[in-house]
Every structure is written in structure tokens, then in C-alpha cells.
Amino acid sequence: MNLRQLFLNNLAQTSQFPLALEFTSAEGSFLFDRDGKKYLDLISGISVSNVGHRHPRVVKAIKDQVDQYMHQLVYGEFVQAPQVQLATALLHTLIPTHRGQVINNVYLTNSGAEAVEGAMKLAKRYTGKSEIIACRNSYHGSTQGALSLGEEHFRRNFRPLLPGIGKIDRNDPGAIDKITDRTAAVIIEPIGAESGVRITDPAFMTALAEKCRQTGTLLIFDEIQTGLGRTGYTWAAEKFGFAPDILLSAKALGGGLPLGAFMAPVEIMSVFRENPILGHITTYGGNPVSCVSGLTSLEVLLEEINLADVTRKGERIRQIFEKHPDVREVRGEGLMLAAEFADFGVLKSYIDRYISRGVITDWFLYCDNSMRITPPLNIRDEEIDELEEVILSVRA
Ligand SMILES: Cc1ncc(COP(=O)(O)O)c(C=O)c1O
């Protein structure tokens, strides 16, 4: 059996039609197949490879760390320099919360879903309340707590899930009234990713934050896709002028290795210390190799990537897709974009043709008529020229 057949037979499949493409190496904005054919990566592993594939500084940092140690003990017991340095560097990037507090504590996790789980537990434990409100059509992860926040089609066959989950619509002013004294937390992505890149209106976010302050509710931003430069801001929160009470990160955080985080003022985070002690624990969360990868990626982002350039390149790509006669709308900010086609059939035939022309893209979990356009943030202008040539010359 060849590798493809073994892949289909021996690895658990989550759809009837996996893409089953095989790339044998990756560099910068490109993936390479066995024949050395290069593919421009418009997915970035779902907003993971923000600093490009195998950035030399990141690769070196990982190798150096592996030469020292790979794992010591579960999260939070030993002082491990990669964790401490990453947390310190991350905290320096954050603006004050909507309450004027400083986010000065980081909990490192394995994944985005674990960051969501940790944040939900933290909000319940800190506020003593249990209701959590999320946006319709949002995706926060596949574990049962995170799934409870998700879209009905995805969660209905996995009941019973968490009770006490309320739903609101992004940008619906009436939604604010659903937040009450019983609400422990509201969780929202600054830009709804898997619903097809839906921007949150700043006035809505400001009203949401105000209602959270009135009702003793914690505001959680899921920046697992929007964070770390993706939208042209280090954190998309900056656009609203305030950070939430709990900020979630993952995906690009590990620079290509598994890593997530939830971050909050120590006053909130400290509830995990007692009653019970070890309020959230994890074996691999904050793995030192992931942390050096994440720290170096963050340094690359801050030192080498000009965020104004992310916005400019995003604008260039937006204009390319806007010229396309079959694109009905382009949504997004920075290099987090979605191009909407008439329906899934039209979109899929473009995706397949683009792949055969060396451009990799896909669609969104809850939006199957829109193309995902999230290249590495350091995509070069010459690469965007190549992209333009493919996008505008192919017809479905
Ligand atoms: C916005 C958002 N939150 C949470 C998650 C879950 O992250 P993970 O897949 O690392 O568990 C995802 C994953 O796609 C996501 O897009």
C-alpha cells in the first residue's frame, strides 16, 4: 500500500472526502510536493504559519532547545525559561482591559480548545456564576465544553453538552440585553473566523464590554485566529481600544508547534490556586520546545513584520479578488480575508483549479461559499503578483 492508501486506511478520517494532498517540505509562503512542485499557501495551516513555514530563526531556536531539554514536569511546577520568557514577552504586547486592568498572567495550554476550556472554568470559578454566552456560528473548538459554545449542526449529536450556554448574534444591538447578572462570561472572536470572516462593529463591542462591567460578567476574546498580527494589529483587540478580561491565543502562538494560552489579570487567574488547588492542570501545556518556537515567532513578528505592510498586502489581495467576476464580496482585515462566491459548487471548482495551478486554499467550517485567504504575514509582493496571475486567469 502506498502512503496515501495507508493515510486513508489507518488514520481516523473526519470527512468522506479529505483533500489527501501530500507535501514533503515547506519554506516561507510555499508547500512543496514530492515532485518539487511549489504551492502558494493561502491557508497557513489555518492561521498558524504567520511568520511563514520554517522561519530560520524559529528552526534554530527549536534545535537549540531540543539540545537542552524537551520536557521536565507538568505545567506550573518547575521554573522553565522558555515558558517564563514567552509569557513575559506576550504580556508586553497587551493593552489594558476595558476595566483599565493590566493583563499580567499567562496560563499556557496545549491547544486552542484547552485555552477555551480553561477560560470557561476560570470565569465560572471567579464569578461564581455558570451561564456563558457565545456568538451564533462561532467555532471555539471540538472538546465538549468548547463544542457547547458552537454551532447547532456541529453539536447536536453530541448531547448532553454544557448547560447554561446562551447565544447572541454578532452586531445585534438587542443581543446586549441577554447578558444579565447570571452571566459568568461572554466569549467572542473580534472577527468571526469560521462563520466566514465576520467583522465585529466597534460600537457593538464597546456596548458588550459596558454591559459586562454592569453585570459582573467577564469578557473573553477568542483571538486564536485573529491574534499575532493576522488582522494588521498585534491583537485584533487593539482596534476596539481595550483588551478583554481573558484573552485566548493558540494557532500562530506556537509558531508551528502545539501551544495555546489564556491570559488575564492575576487577580482573576489566582482563583486556580485554591479551592481546589490545581484548578487547571495540564501535562504538555507550555511544552518548552513549543514555547521557544512561540517566543521566537513572536520576536520575528515584532522585529521583522511590519503590521502596516500586513494591512497593505491585505488590501492588494482584496483588490485582486474584487476584480474577479465570480466573486460577490471580499470580507476581512489585514491578511484575514474571505472571498464569497455564489455557492459551494462554484467555490469548490475554483479551489480545485487553483490547487492544480499551485495555490492552496479552502473554505470555512460554517461558510461553504467563501474562500479562505490567510497567507503567511510575510508573503512577498512578488508572490502576490504570482497569486494575481493565477486568480485572474483561471475560470471555473
Ligand atoms: C477561533 C477558534 N477558537 C478555537 C479553536 C480551537 O483551537 P484548537 O484546534 O487548537 O483546539 C479554533 C480552531 O480552529 C478557532 O478557530
Image (tube, helix red, strand yellow):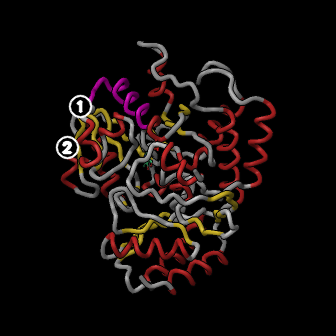
Q: Residue at x 61, y 44 (%)?
A: 254
Q: Mark 1: which amino acid?
A: Pro
Q: Check the image and name the residue furthest to the front.
A: 1
From which residue to which does the magenta span run?
116-130
Q: Nearer the viewer, residue 48 or 271?
A: 48
- Is 267 above or below relative to 249? above
- Is 80 above or below relative to 173? above
What crowding class fits label 1: few (fewer than 14 Cα within 10 Å), some (14-19), or many (20 or more)? Answer: few
Residue 3 position within the rendered picture, expressed as x and y whole percent measured from the top left: 59, 52
Q: Residue at x 46, y 46 (%)?
A: 243
Is residue 100 at all visible to an observer of this figure?
yes
Separation of residues labelled 2 and 1 (CA atoms):
23 Å
Q: Residue at x 71, y 60 (%)?
A: 304
Residue identified by numbered label 1: 160
Main SS of the magenta segment? helix
Number of residue marks: 2
Q: Residue at x 64, y 75 (%)?
A: 383
Residue 145 position within the rendered picture, expressed as x and y whole percent measured from the top left: 34, 34
Q: Is residue 173 left or right of residue 86?
A: left
Does 121 appear in magenta?
yes
Work out whether mark 2 precedes mark 1 in sequence or the reverse, and give the earlier one. Answer: 1
Tag in front: 2 or 1: 1
**Secondary structure beneath disc 1?**
loop
What crowding class fits label 2: few (fewer than 14 Cα within 10 Å), some (14-19), or many (20 or more)? Answer: some
Hey, which quadrant is residue 26 in on the image?
Answer: bottom right
Residue identified by numbered label 2: 178
Residue 52 position within the rendered picture, expressed as x and y whole percent measured from the top left: 65, 59
Q: Nearer the viewer, residue 193 or 84?
A: 193
**Secondary structure beneath disc 2?**
helix
- Is 284 above or below relative to 315? above
Residue 361 position within the rendered picture, expressed as x and y whole percent measured from the top left: 49, 66
Hey, which quadrant is residue 76 in on the image?
Answer: top right
